[in-house]
Amino acid sequence: MWFVLTLVTALIVLSIYGAFVGAERASELFNSVPMQIFWFLITIAFAASLVLFPSLVKRPSLLLIHLGCIGILAGSIWASQTGHEIQKKLFGIDKVHSGRMLVYEGHKINKVLMSGHEGVFELPFALGLNDFWMELYDSPDADGRRVVSDYLSDISVIEDGKVVKRKTIELNKPLHYGGYYFYQSSFDEAAGKYTVLAVASDSGLFVVFAGYVLLVAGLFGRCWLAPMAKAGANKINNGN
């Protein structure tokens, strides 16, 4: 138990540290080999606790909390850069972890510039930019210029020469297709002729979401339902 608590404390400290060093350095830290070993150890520790402490299985809320933590950690490992390398070596799943695409209006492309300038990855489908436009605030700024409030890309997904999906991407409204999310990242500020899309693999994402659902359900049961049930039982006993 103390081993697990020590690992969780270390995770909290590292998370706080990562919040202050910037996204790039934090990404390098959490995707490093020592951290991958740490993720593996803490996941095994949570799983082992279910075997070493059978009483946890008999308490639904604690069981859900532990299963949620295992799901979050396992999904995060699978979604990491190292996880993608493992997927390729062991299962032949060839996916890029993250990167960017620059798409010109009226053109299509399937090449992703991988994060860290590690090379170019070719997707099994292409994205075409049908149209790009910007929306401006009604009121100008202090310099008299109208500031961009949003920028949107009308994107077509092209596979085997056919358009299989079409969606307008804007901030916080990505396109999801073929195991990837495509986010509006930047654009051609001078002429508005191209858009820059951030590409992120969805590997492990749904396992992480399921883990959070289990974790929240377990915490709700532990912190609210269990005390309410106990209080109700005490009230009945005192009444008798």
Image (cartoon, rainbow, N blue to C red):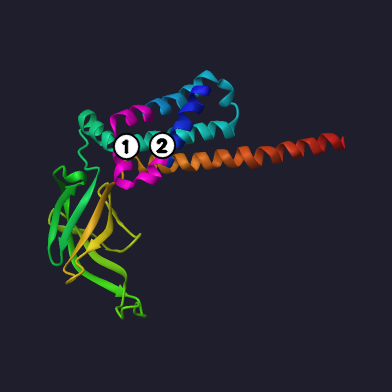
- SS assignment at label 1: helix
Residue 157 occupies quadrant: bottom left
Q: How much space separates mark 1 and mark 2, taking CA atoms?
A: 9 Å
The kind of residue on which mark 1 rests is Leu
Residue 149 position (above or below residue 80): below
The kind of residue on which mark 2 rests is Leu
Using a 10 Å C-alpha cutoff, classify the residue at mark 2 as few (fewer than 14 neighbours), some (14 to 19) or many (20 or more). Answer: some
Residue 209 point in image, percent of width and height: 42, 44
Using a 10 Å C-alpha cutoff, classify the residue at mark 1 as few (fewer than 14 neighbours), some (14 to 19) or many (20 or more). Answer: some
The C terminus appears in which quarter of the rendering? top right
Nearer-the-camera pick, 29 or 194? 29
Residue 103 occupies quadrant: bottom left
- The label shown at residue 29 is 1
**Magenta-tinted stretch:** 17-39
Residue 30 among magenta residues: yes
Residue 63 point in image, percent of width and height: 54, 31
Residue sitting at x 49%, y 22%: 3
Residue receiving disc 2: 14
Residue 122 position (above or below residue 55): below
| Circle 1/circle 2 CB separation < 8 Å | yes
Nearer-the-camera pick, 97 or 91? 97
Residue 28 among magenta residues: yes
Residue sitting at x 38%, y 30%: 39
Nearer-the-camera pick, 157 or 104? 104
Residue 96 point in image, percent of width and height: 21, 43
Of label 1 and label 2, which has the lower sequence position? 2
- The label shown at residue 205 is none
